[in-house]
Amino acid sequence: MPTAPTPKTVHDQRLALIEKSSALAYKPLDDEAIDRARRIVNGTTTPDAAYAELDAKYAAG
């Protein structure tokens, strides 16, 4: 009987899907974007907080 996937496995699969989707769209993600996605997927930050990071980054110029 197969065991249920661990949260780490699920997070890794979701991140792989995000990275592959981006690559297929010819818009590869940089390390900063991958880190932001990782923090959203594993629950250490919220999507709203991640958007706030982007707003702060690009508002600063």
Image (cartoon, rainbow, N blue to C red):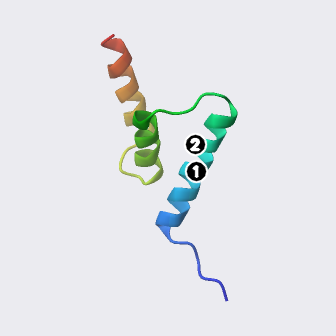
For the point 38% across and 21% down, the residue is: 55
Q: Tags 2 and 1 in contact by the CB under 8 Å rule?
A: yes
Callout 2 secondary element: helix
Of residues 33 and 31, which is closer to you in this image?
31
For the point 38% across and 16% down, the residue is: 58
Q: Amino acid at mark 2?
A: Glu
Residue 16 lies, in percent from the top left, at 58, 50
Which label is found at residue 16?
1
**Is 14 on the left-hand or right-hand side of 24?**
left
**Is 31 on the left-hand or right-hand side of 14?**
left
* Count of marks overlaid on the render: 2
List the residue tagged with mark 2.
19
Q: Amino acid at mark 1?
A: Ala
Look at the image and tell me in which quarter the C terminus lies: top left
Callout 1 secondary element: helix
Of residues 5 and 21, which is closer to you in this image?
21
For the point 37% across and 45% down, the residue is: 45
Residue found farthest to the left? 60
For the point 40% across and 42% down, the residue is: 35
Which label is found at residue 33?
none
Residue 59 lies, in percent from the top left, at 35, 13
**Is 19 on the left-hand or right-hand side of 32?**
right
Residue 48 lies, in percent from the top left, at 42, 34
Residue 31 lies, in percent from the top left, at 42, 37
